[in-house]
Image (spheres, rainbow, N blue to C red):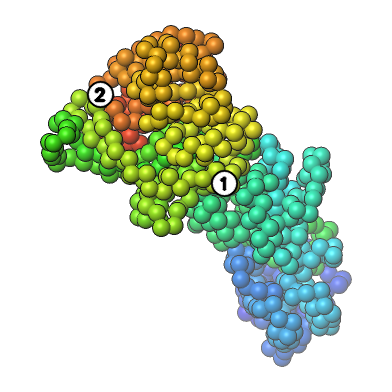
Amino acid sequence: MTIKEIARLADVSISTVSKIVNNKDNNISPETRNRVLKIVKDYHYTPYSGVKNNPESKTFVFGLLLKSLRKTGKFIDGALAAAQKSGYSILIYDSMDSSENELKNIASLCKNHVDGVIWEPVNNDSLENRHYFEEQGIEVCCLNSREDPHFYFIDFTAMGYCAAETLIQYGHTKLGCLTKQDSLRSEMVLDGFKRCLFDNSIPYSSSMNLPIETEEWYNVILTHTPTGIVSTHYGSALTLMEHLSKLRFHVPSDLSLISLRDDARENIAFPGISSFRIPYYEFGTFVCKRLIEKCEKREEELSAFHMDFSLENTESLDIPFDAHAKKIVVVGSINIDVTLNVDELPQPGRTVSTSRHSVIPGGKGANQAVGAAKLGNEVSLIGRVGSDYDSSLIYTCMEENRVNAQGVKREADAETGKAYIHVQNDGESMITILTGANQNLRPEDVISCERAFEHSGYCLLQTEVPESAVETAAALAKKYGAKNILKPAAMKSIRPSLMKLIDIFVPNRKEAELLCPDIPDVEGKADEFIRQGVKTVIITLGHCGCYVKDPSFQGYLPASPFPSVDTTGAADAFIAALAAYLSSGYSMEASARIAAYAAGFCVSRQGVIPALIDRNSLETYISRMEPELLNM
């Protein structure tokens, strides 16, 4: 293609074409210039002056000079797409965060006589080298500086504002911003974070800035100081998620998290982090188009890059930790249940054999914790396990059932408790307990978990762990306004000081007989327990139901009509459901009747934890049997 042919296609003179391609077109109209340049690019015309290496001739080549090519793939993709669409090629240079490399790259760009450069300076001092481009008439679009109004940048300040505003809309007022040191993005996001707090009348303090390189963020997470966190980098959010998992914190119930996300990570599906995608591709397209306008002398009024930011998902967002329904804390025994199914229970002097057995996590504490969690409550478990393989089974079980097991600690040189359970064909059972690490639960261990009692509604206690630890837990629960439910196990007496801390006392018939052997009837035993200081007594009577003595209700309630397969965990299922429905606002009578159904479901199946029912199944069944019960 010759200059004469270009002139003919554009319907202009040869001299007009020559002036335009050699940047001597000041007196030529923009319409003519644009028409000629389009034909020149479409037909890849190279002027004779360009062959002679005339520095003023157009090459239709851009330079892309970036501080670092790491995490800039989408930006480059956007710039390449815009350049190719307009007939330009791009030379890509990586300064690798080095001023020396940057200067060498500038020299190379000048030598190649590029028409323009998209430039991300390594630092502010780099701008002194801009004169090399100016001397050769190379147009420049600079990136990522807030000091120079002519620089282009993604408005991370607005993204920080949007992220903080999202958390505030969910009800969070205790916020943190997870940042990176020496990061322009973090600086801008934090600025937007501060502005959003100011606009919503939430005071900002320096402790809200949580650099990922320090341990401050880790310490404040443990105390629930922030209930919601904005992360400026997706990698930092992943690090946070990893640590939360080790602490057995649940996102979003324990902490809400929202992060900016590099679109290069768009294929990551786990974990589900609510995020705003950083529009690098669109930004690259925008800046390249601006450079083309400058090179072709049709630049409009300078405008900043702007794009609406939309939240990608809400998987890691929830209302604040302390705004959830009242939590349930469980302090008690944690065992591995070894269940042996036998035709009849062992008797002195006789050997009983079986071919059926199961080994699953159990213990009254673990059973009640899982039972309450399955019914939709937020549950924390406090107890002790050994330093053995069985402890791993416990942690896995608690995690699978969404029980916060941060208060479950391994005991060095101890084994996890065992319960050896013989189950007869009619469901009656006999249990032998190997206490193991359970006997090592101390008052100071409970006190170290005091945070778990904050915002709790009920504390479930059993006496298969030392009574001193139980009493300490009961006192802590009272401190935070929670009600205590105590299940006694194989005890002939209970400290009077502990009984005075108990709100609901739930022995079975045999346990009540041990504690009150001189009182023959159930009603009299209940009166005696109330005289000792408890507020409500529920004596469970197996297949005969239970007796309730409460200020709002007094009388017998029937058992639910389920076939008995294994009665081992009936009381645990009953207590878990009782606490769950009391915390939901049901009356004592209604909660106890619902709890009887939960216990019935449990005894109709083998084992305890696998037999505990979820809330939806329980209420679906009750709605068919006693629909009015769920409205009491």
- Work out whether residue 185 can be spotted: yes
Amino acid type assigned to the residue bearing label 2 in the image: Ser
| Label whose residue precedes the other's in the sequence (2 or 1) | 1
Where disc 2 sits, the SS reads loop
Please tell me in which quadrant of the rendered image residue 185 appears.
bottom right
| x 55%, y 56%: residue | 243
Label 2–label 1 contact, CB within 8 A: no
Please tell me in which quadrant of the rendered image residue 227 appears.
top right
Amino acid type assigned to the residue bearing label 1 in the image: Glu
Which residue is under mark 2?
Answer: 564
Above/below status of 389 relative to 576: below
| x 38%, y 19%: residue | 517
Where disc 1 sits, the SS reads helix
Which residue is under mark 1?
Answer: 444
Residue 173 horizontal/vertical position (percent): 72, 40
Question: How far separated are the C-alphas under marks 2 and 1?
Answer: 40 Å
Image position of 224 (left or right of 190)? left
| x 29%, y 38%: residue | 432
Above/below status of 521 relative to 30: above
Q: How crowded is mark 2: few (under 14 residues within 10 Å), some or many (20 or more)?
A: some
> Foreground: 309 or 380?
380
Q: Residues within 10 Å of mark 1 (few under 14, many from 20)?
A: few
